[in-house]
Image: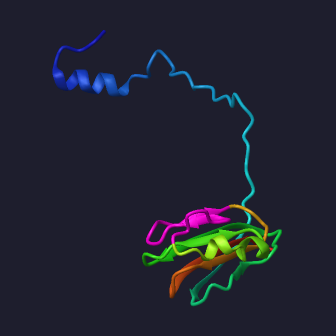
Amino acid sequence: MMPNEPDELLKYETEQEPDYALPVPEVKVCEPVVTVPTVAQHVTCRTYNLTSAAPVQVAALDALRTRAQFIVKGANDVVLCHSISQAQDPANADATLAAPNGAILPGGGGPVSVAATGPLWLVANTFPTRVGVIIERRGA
């Protein structure tokens, strides 16, 4: 029998055991949990000041390299090459870079990333040209 007074009703409700039990939800993992191991990274940073048409090797063959980033400071364009013979192509020394043999990195542009392990060279046709190079390697 339930009481009629509010205080008695509160006392009655707090003293009574509920006549139902809340169900405990069952947790299921529907797919396998995949964990990806992370490897420590090593970073090196350097700025190259290109002062002649001679190519500069900025990255050697490196099986542990995961990425190289290039940031060209100023308005001068730079050509990124994968071999010394490509970097020495006379088209890369042309003042207009109308048909360069390699990839043009625009002066004043944002960073350019290369995810590769092979050697890389930079060559410029306007001097001086500064290029920041950030190399990321897997930890040993």
Is 125 colored magenta in this rendering?
no
Horizontally, is 24 left or right of 59 in the view? left
In the rendered view of the protein, which quadrant contains the C terminus? Answer: bottom right
Q: Quadrant of residue 51?
A: bottom right
Q: Which residues are magenta?
A: 96-114
Q: Position of residue 94 (x, y in %)?
A: 58, 74
Horizontally, is 15 left or right of 93 in the view? left
Dominant SS of magenta comes to: loop
Q: How many marks?
A: 0
Relative height, residue 87 to residue 10 (above, below): below
Q: Quadrant of residue 2?
A: top left
- For the residue pair 110 and 11, the one nearer the viewer reads as 110
In the rendered view of the protein, which quadrant contains the N terminus? Answer: top left
Rendered residue at 28%/27% (across/down):
11
Rendered residue at 74%/68% (across/down):
82
Rendered residue at 65%/70% (across/down):
91
Q: Quadrant of residue 118?
A: bottom right
Q: Position of residue 83 (x, y in %)?
A: 78, 71
- For the residue pair 84 and 40, the one nearer the viewer reads as 84
Is 104 colored magenta in this rendering?
yes
